[in-house]
Amino acid sequence: MMNKLFILLGIIFLSFASCHKDPKTNEVASPVTDPLVTTNEVILNFTNVADTAVLQIAKDTIYTAPTPKYINANGDTFSVTKFKYYVSNIKLKRLDGTYYTEPESYHLLNAGDTINYCRFSLKKVPYDYYVSIEFILGVDSFRNCDGAQSGALDPSEDMFWSWSSGYIFMKFEGYSPRSYPSNSHNLTFHVGGYLTPDNNIRTITLPFNAPYLNVRKENVATVYLKTNVLEIFRNPSIIDFFALNGITNPKSAKTIVANYVDMFSISAIKN
Amino acid sequence: MKYFIAIISVVFFLSSCSKDTEIISNTTTATINEYAPVNPPGWPAPVYNFSNNDVTYDKFMLGRHLFYEPMLSEDTTIACGNCHQQYFAFTNGPDHNVSHGVHDLLGKRNSPALFNLNWHTLYMWDGAVNNLEVQVLAPLANPLELNLSLSNALNRLSKSTKYKNLFKKAFGDTVVDSQRFLKAIAQFMGLLVSYNSKYDKVKRGEDNFSASEKNGYDVYKIQCQYCHVEPLFSDYSFKNKGLPINLYQDSGRYRVTGNPSDQFKFKVPSLRNLAFTVPYMHDGRFVTLDNVLTFFTTGVANTPNLDPFMAIPHTVSVQQKSDLLAFLNTLNDYKFVTDPRFKEIH
């Protein structure tokens, strides 16, 4: 009898003793098994910009700093050598207030990627009108502590901190003549952090204008989004690259996090 | 008998939801038992429970090869197993107070012992690592340790015929990716369970304490149990036990959290296998257990965040000290440090 009890307990422990799952990330996707529900693809197309200019990623060379191309709100010139960020847990809100939730929703966008650009599709979105898109800028807390991941979350993507486990939500690197940390002109902004009090996970909500996103049989719709790097360094705090040219831990990321939550916007929807 | 049934049940459970049933069924019953996760009766439920990492003999063996693979360091000179040697309960050995990395670089901390890792909530002296599966990324990337990027490591392995074969055996094809790599090493580390010390045998009714060991057990309960909780002999919390601040000004857990209340806190190490894990403390500053007990009774420094329990004076008589040492010696697991499953392999 004791033996049986022990076995049962062992099995129960094995099934439940894991990192707590964030209930928000655990929502069941739309009932695609229902034969009455029919679906189509929706393409999300992110264009990385510096206000009106399309962002260009400069070649990172050891010997010479790339020519500065952009000017931040403080008047500091700079160039960008790396700009990568996670968009995860994507949800589309229907007119009736319910949501479509993308299953296994983790996307790593890399402004320097000249193969896929920053374009991917949501595979099976049910026919409907959608009034807004929601996503996490970064990675939810559950996946930050869930061991070895694959796909967009593969640690060999160089977006995982090994000195203190957790994903880097956004990696911005570049040069500015105004920046002068340890004998270089580097800019190094690595934002991450999923633990209180330095939880930097932010949910972004972007409403669509009427006539909204219309997913239907006839056409694959595309949502065009913009990611504006200049927003990282202005509003509410104007960043002076002489004073702040690098963050590489969750605690010191607060100013940048408060700034970068409004770097996304919807530029157009093609239904 | 109880273990046997427990182990079988665990294996049965794992295999029932496993995608790799074929691999398991190809292995003999004896092998399955020997390489199944261990959860000794009476111990708390492990934190890392292999729920997404079904243990098989071939995956474990891949992990074992990787653990002893010097190709996983920048200059191909050292492996995990250099700073974590089996006979020293997977520490660096008595002559290294801090770890030695590539190019003879010295680390800042004593290599922690590797056993009963599944029961830790966080890894490393400062809790920098949050899951056993990603633990290896830290020493791999550290310039003072292995100093090799994950993509370079995977690249080297994918060019090696030996590893192509080992990955194929373990996963069905020769693809080397980070998830397979990390999960295989986690299987090796997760099976390093030490539960066959004299203390364990006494608890199982297979042995008896001597009078001195019994007295020492009582001294332990008063003086040590507050942090070094049975049966793992640690609560794996982070505490400042009052060590004078070292030359490196190592602030411990503060490095990770940035919270002033974590300054000078380090993870409470287990008291198991102390005979093998000389020297002691996060920086290996004490070379004998006698030094350690002298520190606890007369050397505690009032540094920031000193644990309240350590602020109380701790006194033990000469007799109590000798009894305590006798008890601590019952926590050494000779079977573990000589277990052929964990031996160096190439």
Image (cartoon, rainbow, N blue to C red):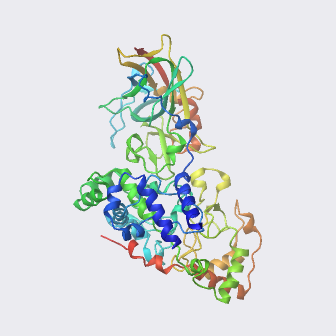
In the image, is residue A125 above or below residue B160? above
Q: Position of residue A201 (x, y in %)?
A: 55, 37
Q: Quadrant of residue A123?
A: top left
B210, A62: nearer the viewer: B210
The reply to whether residue B149 is in sight is no
The reply to whether residue A16 is in sight is yes
Q: Quadrant of residue A183?
A: top left
Q: Position of residue B345 (x, y in %)?
A: 33, 71
- Left or right: A68, with A235 as reference point: left
Q: Residue at x 57, y 66 (%)?
A: B247
Q: Position of residue B319 (x, y in %)?
A: 71, 88
Q: Which quadrant of the rendered structure holds the C terminus of chain B?
A: bottom left
Q: Residue at x 68, y 54 (%)?
A: B261
- Left or right: B269, with B303 as reference point: left
Q: Position of residue A68 (x, y in %)?
A: 39, 30
In the image, is residue B151 above or below residue A151? below
Q: Residue furthest front?
A: A1
In this figure, what is the number of numbered marks?
0
Q: Residue furthest right?
A: B312
B275, A127: nearer the viewer: A127
B117, B6: nearer the viewer: B6
Q: Residue at x 42, y 47 (%)?
A: A149
In the image, is residue B319 above or below residue A136? below
In the image, is residue A225 above or below residue A102? above
- Left or right: B105, with B65 as reference point: right
Q: Residue furthest top?
A: A211
